[in-house]
Image: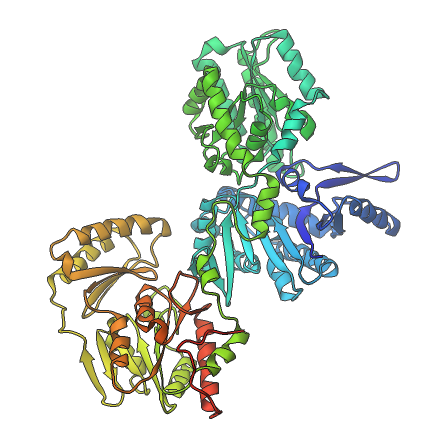
Amino acid sequence: MNRLFIVSHRLPFSAYFENDQIRLKASMGGLASGLLPLLGEDTVWLGWDGLSQKLTKAQKAHVASAFQERGCETVRLPIRAHHAFYNDVSNGVFWPLYHNQTGSLPLTLPHWADYQLINRLFAERLAELVRPGDTVWIQDYHLQLLPRMIRERNLGVSISFFLHVPFPPAEIFRMLPIREEILEGLLGADTIGFHTKGYVDHFKQAVEQIVSYPRVTDGLLVGGRMINVLAAPLGVDVVHWEEIAARQSGGTLVEAIDKMRQDKPDLRILFSVDRLDYTKGLPRKLLAFEKLLEKYPEWQGKITLIQIAPSSRDELAAYNRYKLLVEQMIGAINGRFGFPGYQPVQYFASAFSAEELGQAYGRVNIMLVTPLIDGMNLVAKEFIASRPDMDGVLILSEFAGAADELREALIVNPYDIDAAARTMHAALIMPESERQDRMKRLRDAVTKFSTVEWARLFSQGMGPGSPKLESVQENPFLRPDQLPQLASQLTPPLALFIDYDGTLFPIVRRPELAAPDSGLIMLLGQLGSIPGVEVHIVSGRRFDELFRWFHRLPLHIHGEHGGISYDPQTRQRSFLMESKRDCRPLQRAFQIFERHKSLNEGILIERKVFSTVLHYRMINPDAVDPLLSVVTEEIMSMEGAGEIEILRGKKNLEVRIKGISKARVIENRMAKDDPIFCVAIGDDRTDEDMFAAIGDAGLALGVGSSGTKAHFKLLDSTMVREFLRTLFSHLNTGAEMQTPTQNVPTRVK
């Protein structure tokens, strides 16, 4: 039976020695609590054993055995290299960068080799454990090189990666000196997941800008592989947290809360659980609480903030300074507003078990989750899951990933101290009916998507709310081994109608950079020289550019979507209609494009005989949709709009004269007296016109993952060339070939 391997830096259990005996205890943290319920008979968790000391051979065996009893496998890591990997690179570089804290980045990156080594040791350990057919699911920023390392070993496994922290905007990620290596490492996966759509967009933008792999419907095309990139917010086990909340096992934290209630029955408790980290925004939260007591003095003596903030990364000086700052601020608030028998802020610097936290969640009035930035933050969901009583108020930072789902929380900007204080006051005076209504809606949101459901959907490459690639299902991609069979069903007389950009040549940032290479020139020339075979280049590009590239070859050239054509036999060019360069609607469209070019850096404008084109590949991706909406509205409302049509292509918007269409090229050829079998190959909306014209009387091959009317699909321009080479080899052999009994080859095994 195939197995699931969860791979993370740390295991969900921490190991320690007690009287020379190995002991394990459950680890704290969102990753461990979120994925621990998935451990089972067919699931193995691989990670570092957590022991920094040197172990004897016997101790290593005992440690491995103890973890195996819990469904875990371990990887031993060199102490010095691990320290550099974890502190200097993972937490010294990736953690601040991914949380937009660029001021905390080091000046140099001397320990990059240690990060590579630790990732390689994980890959080697996996190679010892996995079998073909298994699934490897890699977790978080510590192991970003691992997907590619696994793929390069050809282990026959499927590879998924999930990032539990934010992925920063592309302009921030570009600051990373080893940005290409990280992206290439991640792109070794088959599926890459993030908590929110915003992080997905950031990642795709970085890939496009830095390593130039194109987007497709729900993912990216990388070296002939389609990688699914999806948003899948991590959930919690609601039933588990409800059960914890119902228990009465007590503990230090629970007893402290009960004592506060006993001393002050009307006390309102605000509760916050954070790791002591600069991304959690503790100083701003404390300033907002102080502002609340200052602005609303009626709450003095009647409310308490319980702040749990276990220290993390004590070995880093910056974290010790941060801890000192937080403790000084708490002392100042308690000194200013406290009095004998009352402290406004109760501070716990130690961690508590899920058992205690779950019971505490049900005993407090307000939950404060106000990070400056956070990938998800499961504390907010744990609190909601622990409130089957339908009471309690959640105050949630708009910069936490959970805010996308939990819209019934009181959403705050943690940078706005006054607004945060007002929100705390609003939570304190909120009527019971509103509290219960909000909590019911929050629980509905959390209940419908549990941890197990999240893992199941992610392992299928489909996050919640992410549409499936219907085009892939309806028109399957042809595999390389299927191309010879398809080619063998084609025989002269044969006409090939082939688009250029995105089909014969990959999409590039600037159109002028897509000149054909020598290999493509040779391939097209060979095909066009075969008796009984016509090769037509049908492109939206300017005719003069295509003519300059291809006029020495035996090719039919059709520029501007067939508006201008060239016949290699007569050596004559022809026009589909009279030149319209002076067409007033086209001139007005050009003026609209020019105006927006002056407002948006990166826009390119191209004028043709029958159209004018706005290229927006190099502008900020976030500005694309607003730009196209405004431009389209302006063009459609201008005088003479009925004479033109608007086409949205691959990173361009084209305004052309009505009546121009690639379909006309095929229709004109099929109308001739000599019958010929037509094959059309293309990648965008304008090529769908060719596919419609062919119908079932020929063969249509779509390129990429967009929805299409094509009979079959080729993954990218590399696969198109491979098909054409296969076809040439087949046609050039002179082997016996029969004319297909059906118009369209329908069986490709």
Asked which quadrant contains residue 115, the reply is bottom right
What's the coloring here? Answer: rainbow
Query: Height in image: 322 above or below 481?
Result: above
Instruction: Identify which residue, 160 or 662, lies in the foreground.
Output: 662
Give the quarter of the image for residue 568: bottom left
State the residue at coordinates (49%, 11%): 299
| 11 relative position to 449: left or right | right
Say which quadrant the C terminus sits in: bottom right
Q: Where is residue 89 in the image (x, y as percent from the top left)?
A: 61, 49
Seen at 37% across and 65% down, the residue is 709
**Residue closest to the far front:** 741
Q: Residue 64: x, y in percent? A: 81, 49
Taking the spot 21% from the left edge, 69% from the top edge, the residue there is 660
Residue 744 visible: yes
Classify residue 443 as left or right of residue 676: right
Residue 353 coordinates in the image, percent (x, y): 69, 29
Q: Residue 363 falls in which quadrant of the image? A: top right
> Split into 4 quadrants, where in the image is the N terminus?
bottom right
Query: Considering depth in this image, is 604 or 200 the residue closer to the camera?
Result: 200
Compared with 516, 466 (above or below) is: above
Quick check: 575 left or right of 311?
Answer: left
The answer to whether one can see residue 545 in this image is no
Between 230 and 133, the residue placed more toward the observer is: 133
Labels in figure, total = 0
Front residue of 288/367: it is 367
Query: In the rendered image of this protein, does residue 620 appear above or below residue 261?
Result: below
Q: Where is residue 583 in the image (x, y as percent from the top left)?
A: 12, 65
